[in-house]
Image (tube, helix red, strand yellow):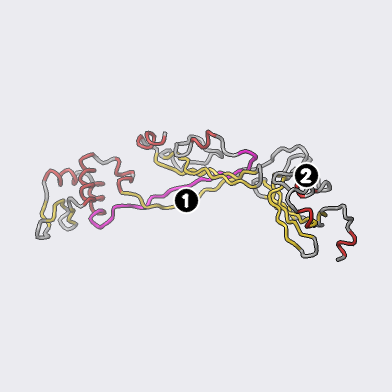
Amino acid sequence: MAVKSFIDPSIKYVPQAGFSVVYTENGGVEASQDFLIRNATIQSGNAAISGFVRGATWESLWPEVPQLYRLLTLKTHDPTDRGDGWSILKTTFTGYQFSSNGSSGEESTVPTTSLVGQLEDVALAQHPKWSSLSDTVKNILNRLISGDWVYDLEEQEVGYIDSDGDFRPGWASVNNALNASADGVNFANIIASGESTYRRGGWTYSYHTESKTGFSAGQLNSLGKIVNTPLGNPINPSSGYKWLLVAPNQTQSGVDRFMKTLDYQLIPDNATNDFLYG
């Protein structure tokens, strides 16, 4: 009951000692502070609680806040009734680290990047050695994959399975065309072993920032398109690949803090991808 005795009745809330501030690597700030507030002032429409609105500056609620944090804005405010006519109002604030003396309001955010490699199962037809095959050999291999024809590993010959379930040799022209291609024979052996895919290496490059503004229209319009110069200028493993923007992700914290990630993946640099994603 002592709290009621020593706080002037005209005082509606009291900032509590101590607050916490957490900085992110990209320059963002998350802070929290408790306020002791009379339950009577929490009622809807009360002028004292009306200051606790999303986007209100920390300074407007606590003028003595250190200068570095004055422009942080209110994110959440959650009251917990103490049962004595007072509640603890837990508040969180969000914003950015500021340059210079902290009063200019300029963002000093720092971008960060990540690069993750992964293996994925893709069709044999996407293998670089497949693209150099003749159309005739590609057709033969596709017939093997579909099961129309079979490749006998012992005989090293294309054929078919008859009604009795026996292998029957195929056509000389087909086998001659296949045998003329060393890569084609290797693919035929792989398919005959039951494989129709291979594990291809891939890379995902991510560019992370925090800002007062969300994605630009240009960034959103680039989804699913080849981007010649991704932000941060990642290094290509070879000249045979290009970066494709696969995922712009954005999360909002508070009124004006946007945490953004642009994800790019490497795709083969060829005429097909230029046509589809250029």
Task: Give the side of residue 206 with respect to residue 50, left or right.
Answer: left
* Position of the C terminus by quadrant: top left
Specify the amino acid type for callout 1: Gly
Q: Nearer the viewer, mark 2 or mark 1?
A: 2
Residue 199 in view here: yes
- Secondary structure state at the residue bearing disc 1: strand
The image position of residue 71, as x and y in percent, is 75, 43
Q: Position of residue 50 (x, y in %)?
A: 75, 47
Q: Is residue 146 above or below residue 240?
A: below
Disc ID at residue 117: 1
Number of the label disc, if any, that sits on residue 70 = 2
Q: Is residue 13 left or right of residue 23?
A: right
Name the quadrant containing residue 68: top right
Residue range in magenta is: 191-213
Query: Is 205 part of what is drawn in magenta?
Result: yes
Which residue is pictured at 72% across the width and 53% down the height?
91
User: Where residue 220 sits in the image (x, y, percent)?
Assistant: 51, 37
| Residue occupying image coordinates x 62% and y 38% | 213
Label 1 packing within 10 angstroms: few (<14), some (14-19), many (20+): few
What x and y, as percent, mark residue 13? 81, 54
In the image, 257 versus 8, the foreground residue is 8
